[in-house]
Image (cartoon, rainbow, N blue to C red):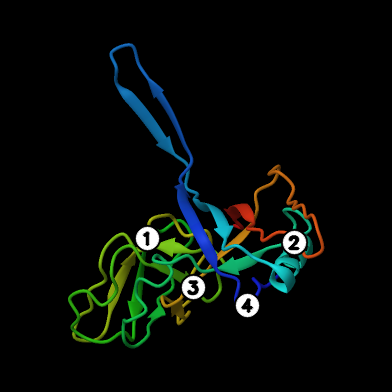
Amino acid sequence: MAVWPTGIKLGSAELSSNTPQYSSESANLRTFVVTIPSHRYEAEVETVRLAGADRLRFWAFVESLRGASGTFDLQLPPQSTHNNAASGSCTALATAAGAVQVPIAGAPASQAAWLKAGGLVRFAGHTKAYCLIDDVATNGSGAGTLRLNAALQRDVTLGEAVSFRNVPIRFRLRPGASPQRYSQSGQDGPITSFSLALIEAI
């Protein structure tokens, strides 16, 4: 897996949530929707303007991805950092793939909204990122439930750690996207920003 270059910041980012569906509309205008139990995040990101060594360093990172073959983790605030201020930690209880709720244990007790809706979580044995669709309340024993935006792509095991601070999304370049390029003229070349079309690697 490639590593996003240290110190290279984003100038802009647009995050999309893709839940695949089939739909049809009857003659009497009823709409029928079938949701496929899958999900991925997609993003359009652009770096700040880069010059000199930073420009070449980022170019080398893009080259290392070898098109859509390589993957990398990238945090996208505010979703990735929404629950950074939450105290404590938690682990998951065993939950089968396909579930949209995951029970947890070991969290701070008696919290009305320990984790806030809108933040991302990732399980230790997964690369998929999930969004919390409700605040997470805990009882006097520190138990609660994570309600997720999408069905689990694989089983969660008993005691699996749950990450909720600085949660990255694992991306790859979108297959078929325009190749990366830049041009330069003169001795030092221009200051350049890079735009990447990304899809979550699931």
Residue type at the position of mark 1: Leu
Mark 1 or mark 2, earlier in chain: 2
Residue type at the position of mark 4: Thr
Please name the residue shown 31% across and 59% down the image: 133
Mark 3 or mark 1, earlier in chain: 3
Nearer to us of marks 1 and 2 is 2
Report how many numbered discs are placed on residues in the image: 4
Mark 3 or mark 4, earlier in chain: 4
Residue 141 placement, left or right of 119: left
Q: Are marks 3 and 1 in contact (CB under 8 Å)?
A: no
Whole-percent x and y of residue 195?
62, 53
Mark 3 or mark 2, earlier in chain: 2
Residue type at the position of mark 3: Phe
Q: Are marks 4 and 2 in contact (CB under 8 Å)?
A: no
Residue at image mark 1: 148
Give the crowd class for mark 3: few <14, some 14-19, many >=20 residues within 10 Å.
Answer: some
Residue 73, placed above or below residue 153: below
Residue at image mark 2: 65
Using the image as rendered, state which of residue 153 and residue 67 is in the foreground. 67
Residue at image mark 3: 123
Q: Residue furthest top?
A: 27
Using the image as rendered, state which of residue 107 and residue 182 is in the foreground. 182
Please name the residue shown 68% across and 67% down the image: 51
- Measure the C-alpha gap from mark 1 to mark 4: 31 Å
Residue at image mark 4: 6
Residue 174, placed above or below residue 164: above
Give the crowd class for mark 2: few <14, some 14-19, many >=20 residues within 10 Å.
Answer: some
- Measure the C-alpha gap from mark 3 to mark 1: 12 Å
Snapshot quadrant of residue 61: bottom right
